[in-house]
Amino acid sequence: MATMNTATTVDDIPAPPRPGESDALDEVLVGLSPPPRARRRVLAVLLSAIPVAALFLASQMIDDVRYSMAPTFAVSLGDGRTADPASVGLNHYVTLRAAPSMADAVTYSRLLWPGEHLVFPVAGRDGTPIYVQVSQDGAQAMARGEFQGRLTRFGGAGGRYAGVGEYLRGTHHAPVTADTWLLVDGATPRRHLWAPLLATLLLAIALSDLGLLRRLFRSARS
């Protein structure tokens, strides 16, 4: 039994309408039901949440962006017993000579920052305390008693060290607040060049989603 295959030819494709005539294809599209409102609302919520989250994450990197643009030469704070970090200010690359007070030291680790970190106060200091954080590669700094890195606070850097300050205050009853000074040994400005790149990416994501959200509301009105 013979079979015949039918193929679409040029004659089967409708010709475009003449000027002044209605387009049958447009009438078919107009007759289609609009998309469900619930789906549109869910999409609007998602498009609204993404830029909010992106802008929030970008705001947490303001200190990191500033530090990445700081001078690469270290400012000497001198002896840790009499040093005045306020004379230099936040997010500067500094050097500090100090002896650690290991009795009040703590160790911790973070999920996104592999390895253990040791945080201790400067020994022999009167008045406002200064804490130093040393990572696993800071053994030489501990041996020579000189630390070089980022000058910040426990409440700075997007709250990255806030949990450590709360642990010191709650467990060791240390006089640690969000304004207590912290020197992060080994943290150079060049190691924070990722911050402006990531912040720019987050801002681009927020702007693109806001553009999509605007188009969605415009199509809903029309």
Image (tube, grey):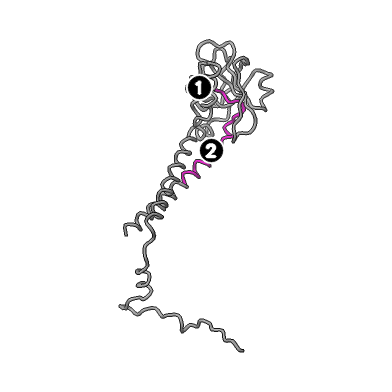
Q: Residue at x 37, y 56 (%)?
A: 37
Magenta stretch, residue numbers: 180-204
- Above or below for 191 versus 143: below
- Badge 1 density bin: few <14, some 14–19, many ≥20, Cα 10 Å: some
Q: Residue at x 57, y 32 (%)?
A: 189
Nearest the viewer among 178 and 84 is 178
- Above or below for 17 versus 90: below
Residue 77 can be seen in this image: yes
| Residue 81 in picture, x, y percent from top left | 57, 12
Looking at the image, which residue sits at the far front? Answer: 1
Q: Main secondary structure of the magenta part?
A: helix
Q: Residue at x 39, y 60 (%)?
A: 35
| Residue 118 in picture, x, y percent from top left | 62, 23
Q: Looking at the image, is mark 1 or mark 2 nearer the viewer?
A: 2
Q: CA distance from mark 1 to mark 2?
A: 22 Å
- Helix, strand or loop at label 1? It is loop
| Residue 60 in picture, x, y percent from top left | 48, 35
Q: Mark 1 vs mark 2: which is more N-terminal?
A: 1
Nearest the viewer among 172 and 79 is 172
Q: Residue at x 62, y 28 (%)?
A: 186
Magenta highlight on residue 61? no
Q: What residue type is disc 2 on? A: Ala
Residue, disc 1: 88
Nearest the viewer among 183 and 114 is 114
The dot on residue 195 is 2
Q: What residue type is disc 1 on? A: Val
- Badge 2 density bin: few <14, some 14–19, many ≥20, Cα 10 Å: some
Corner quadrant of residue 28: bottom left
- Above or below for 190 versus 201: above
| Residue 209 in picture, x, y percent from top left | 43, 50
Corner quadrant of residue 16: bottom left
